[in-house]
Image (cartoon, rainbow, N blue to C red):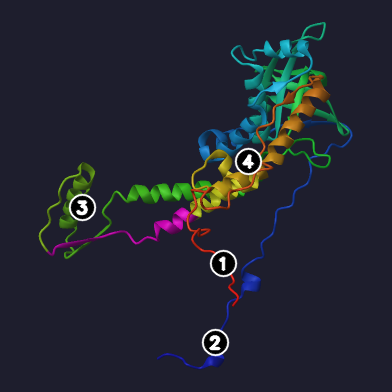
């Protein structure tokens, strides 16, 4: 019999049974004054995210493209001639090499280009090196040298022989911050949501759950095989009347799942500092697109300025990357007649007036 005595009611023990959320502590990777060796252990994991998931690579490629792909200028004709003739691994150009450099910097946190110069200090070539084959040797707070793995041994490289760019290095960090590692929690949630949705969509191919009016395992197995064959081949399925009832799988609304997917995708772009409208106009209004462009300006400009500084301070290469067109002075159209993409936002047939007798 049910117990109706309210004095015997109990409560959950959230305080002791459900722990509070705790953010993982992070210490900077600083040296101790002696030679400190710094490796890039997350390179392969980061490349796996980049190459296997276009959702991850899209904002990285967009930011890199906006940073360097409008070309560059220099007041030094000799420097222009040198940079115009670098070929990287044989079929590269300075533009493709520097785009590659920016992408790797965002993926890993650090990127490296070996500078090949003549005895008279003329730039002969620039060769990108993947960070997994680079070791930093740090003394105190400064890089003493680089070492590059050539497949057999570590080869020492002077500091001046390497163009080294770090992404958002803070404090006395010895390495930069990976775009992927810093947003890993959001990325994993997004990829998990995509994997779940893919599984659900694939199972939509099946008709659902069949309720039979028999407990005979052999008959059920035979009927299931016929249903499976019919679904697979797109054929008609014939069952005796009132012997089986097919109902769809119980599932939450696809709209809820789509909203969850879109939320996480937008969040990943947001945490990376790249408005989604920069990579795609899908679902973006005119106002949203323009404001996203304006917000993005200082972000890609910082990347350009940082890269210009690395080239000048480390390699005495003084160039300026062309800035994309600015929308800072533009305002969205607020009049309905001019803004054809919006309707019923400013009725033209209403005129406010005050009549005095």
The numbered mark, 3 or 1, whose residue comes first in the sequence reads: 3
Instruction: Using the numbered discs, state the Cα–Cα distance from disc 4 to disc 3 in whole angstroms.
Output: 46 Å
Secondary structure of the residue carrying tag 4 is helix
Residue at image coords 16%, 52%: 222
Q: Which residues are magenta?
A: 242-259
Q: Earlier in the sequence, mark 1 or mark 4?
A: 4
Q: Nearer the viewer, mark 1 or mark 4?
A: 1
The residue lying at 81 percent from left, 6 percent from top is 119
Residue 130 can be seen, yes or no = no
* Distance Cα–Cα, label 3 vs label 1: 70 Å
Spatial distance from mark 2 to mark 3, Cα to Cα? 48 Å
Q: Is residue 251 left or right of residue 55?
A: left
Query: Mark 1 vs mark 2: which is more N-terminal?
Result: 2
Q: Secondary structure at mark 3?
A: helix
Residue 208 at least partly seen: yes
What quarter of the picture does the N terminus occupy?
A: bottom left
4 or 3: mark nearer the eye? 4
Does residue 100 show up magenta in the picture? no
Residue 224, numbered label:
3
Which circle marks residue 352 in the picture?
Answer: 1
Residue at screen point 67% across, 26% down: 101
Q: Which residue is mark 2?
A: 9
């Amino acid at each position: 019999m049910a117990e109706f005595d309210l004095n015997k009611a109990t409560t959950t023990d959230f305080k002791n049974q459900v722990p509070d959320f705790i953010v993982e502590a992070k210490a900077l990777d600083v040296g101790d004054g002696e030679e400190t060796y710094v490796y890039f252990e997350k390179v392969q994991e980061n490349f796996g995210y980049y190459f296997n998931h276009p959702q991850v690579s899209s904002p990285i490629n967009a930011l890199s493209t906006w940073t360097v792909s409008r070309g560059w200028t220099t007041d030094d004709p000799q420097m222009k001639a040198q940079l115009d003739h670098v070929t990287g691994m044989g079929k590269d150009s300075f533009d493709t090499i520097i785009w590659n450099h920016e992408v790797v910097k965002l993926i890993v946190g650090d990127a490296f280009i070996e500078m090949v110069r003549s005895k008279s200090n003329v730039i002969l070539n620039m060769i990108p090196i993947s960070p997994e084959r680079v070791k930093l040797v740090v003394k105190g707070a400064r890089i003493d040298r680089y070492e590059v793995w050539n497949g057999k041994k570590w080869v020492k490289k002077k500091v001046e022989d390497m163009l080294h760019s770090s992404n958002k290095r803070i404090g006395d960090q010895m390495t930069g911050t990976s775009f992927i590692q810093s947003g890993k929690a959001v990325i994993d949630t997004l990829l998990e949501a995509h994997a779940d949705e893919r599984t659900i969509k694939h199972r939509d191919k099946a008709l659902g759950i069949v309720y039979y009016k028999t407990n005979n395992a052999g008959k059920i197995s035979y009927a299931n095989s016929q249903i499976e064959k019919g679904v697979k081949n797109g054929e008609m399925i014939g069952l005796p009347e009132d012997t089986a009832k097919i109902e769809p799988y119980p599932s939450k609304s696809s709209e809820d799942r789509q909203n969850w997917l879109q939320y996480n995708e937008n969040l990943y772009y947001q945490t990376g500092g790249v408005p989604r409208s920069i990579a795609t106009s899908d679902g973006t209004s005119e106002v949203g697109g323009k404001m996203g462009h304006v917000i993005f300006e200082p972000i890609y400009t910082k990347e350009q300025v940082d890269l210009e500084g690395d080239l000048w301070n480390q390699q005495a290469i003084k160039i300026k990357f062309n800035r994309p067109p600015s929308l800072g002075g533009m305002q969205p159209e607020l009049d309905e007649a001019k803004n054809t993409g919006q309707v019923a936002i400013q009725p033209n047939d209403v005129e406010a007036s005050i009549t005095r007798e």
